[in-house]
Image (cartoon, coloured by chain):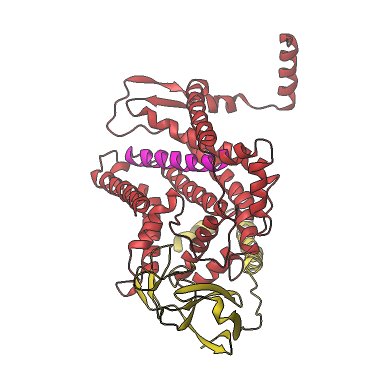
Amino acid sequence: MYRMKLAEAEQTPTEARRDFISKLLGIWSVAVAAPICTAILKFVTPIIPEGPATESIDVGARNDIVENSARIVRFGKEPVILVHTQSGQYKAFFARCTHLGCIVQYQGHGIPHFSCNCHGSQFDINGKNVAGPAPRPLSPLRVSIKETAVIISKV
Amino acid sequence: MPNPRSAIRFGSWLRERLPVSDDVFAFFAKKSVPRHRHSVWYYFGGLTLFFLMVQVVTGVLLALYYKPSPEHAHQSVSTIINDVPYGWLIRSLHSWGANLMIATLFIHMFSAFLLKAYRKPRELMWLSGVLLLFLVLGFGFTGYLLPWDTMAYFATLIGTEVPKTLPIIGDWGVGLLKGGDDIGAETLTRMYTIHIVILPLTSLIIVSFHLLTNQLLGSSMPLGVEEKRPAIRFFPNFLYRDLIAWTMGFISLLALATLIPWGLGERADPFASAPLGIKPEWYFLPLYQTLRIVPSTVFSVSGEFFVNGIVGLVAVLWAGIPFLDRKASRGEKSRLFTVLGILLIAYLAITIILAYAT
């Protein structure tokens, strides 16, 4: 610190002025760059519109989906997998694998389960993660039958 | 037949208007390339540059027909392949060229690593090279979505989800890549812009810097290798040899593009299950395979976070090799780093084989 002050004291007025202007330029650069960078960051951050939240959907007649098979349906913006199990039950889950978001597939042969073909995660028929890297179970939805229609709604 | 006198007159006319100092010519003329038993590895940097130039030319041509929207992207690529004269060739050259560029870049990088070319005073050359590796992988990732086929869709879905485990900026990073909460039109335009504007501009700067450091410092002489014959001048002697390598590279690329034309999968359906056997390109297979084998929880953190952390750490260490390997910088042999490099190469090779085999 003392040496720095000594060096400053030894500067000629021209050098001192140049030094001062350099420092001023540095501060000015930061002052200009900071708001520009902030604006760019704000600009590139996407605006995700808040659409009306989907509470339930009607996926059609119950006979359209045969036993031991599944169908991917839209639940708002999200894919949902609706399964008609071997025992005649209907189950529905958000279809995105909890690992990295691929859409799972229903496997009806052997012990029925859901598999993700991206990294090999597996979920049992109740959505529980049983194999592979998936960290969480699939999120379930409620399935109800109104007359002949299958209704999927949030739990 | 051009008149030699006219050529001389044009030369002096040009020199009057572009008074380039002789020092500039001397600067380029002084570069030489050492000759020894490992000289063959010097060709791979030039080959990578050549494939990059092929990518620029074919990419500009493809951009004339490509339409970056989910409604039109797949159809426009199909039109390029099926209807545009030589469109199949240009598209195939672009896709195969990307693979060859990344392959030669890996060879160039690992040969530079094993020959300790990163050691003092070439630290900045190494750092810019590592940066170019990331940029080239970025080219591969952003270009992959553009055809909007099933494989492209799911590869991008996975790739854009990868940053989500990063602390604080994870969700923001995912949104930044996707341009929304899902893979859609916004993602495609972002990937397209990054692919054709941001990455090329950044690469131009970094490639120029990389070549400048090479011009200033010359090619590295491997440790413990004797130069039995005098070095050869780069301009024009080594450049002629480079041109032969480029010709061989182009013949290989043409052979691949014509004999195994790059295909186009089914149009992406965001509401369909990921198909069986889905895999990314070979250069992302080590990451893919690692994500597959790491369990959901490791040392009480999530498997994805663990993998991201390890990959980030390896990337930082890889970039910092010249500063870590102090022995090589002193001109001494550093066996530990050679072994670590070989282990890394082995890991990449094994995971690629495993990913194909399972």
Residue B133 visible in the snapshot = yes
**In the image, B233: left or right of B329?**
right
Above or below residue B250? Residue A31 is below
Q: Position of residue B136 (x, y in %)?
A: 51, 47
Q: Quadrant of residue A88?
A: bottom left
Q: Position of residue B117 (x, y in %)?
A: 37, 38
- Give the camera-side residue of A131 and B26: A131
Q: Position of residue B226 (x, y in %)?
A: 29, 26
**In the image, B274: left or right of A55?**
left
Most frequent secondary structure within the magenta stretch? helix
Above or below residue B95? Residue B25 is above
The magenta stretch spans residue B228: no
Residue bounds of the magenta highlight = B93-121
Q: Colour of chain B?
A: red
Task: Name which residue lies at 60% across and 80% down.
Answer: A60
Q: Position of residue A124 (x, y in %)?
A: 37, 76
The magenta stretch spans residue B113: yes
- Give the camera-side residue of B3 and B184: B184
**In the image, B178: left or right of B163?**
right
Task: Name which residue lies at 32% across and 40% down.
Answer: B114
Q: Which part of the image, by quadrant, shows the N terminus of chain B?
A: top right
* Tally of numbered tags: 0
- Give the camera-side residue of B79 and B230: B79
Indicate the chain coloured yellow by its letter: A
Residue B168 visible in the snapshot = no
Above or below residue B214? Residue B289 is below
Q: Quadrant of residue A62?
A: bottom right
Q: Which part of the image, by quadrant, shows the C terminus of chain B?
A: bottom left
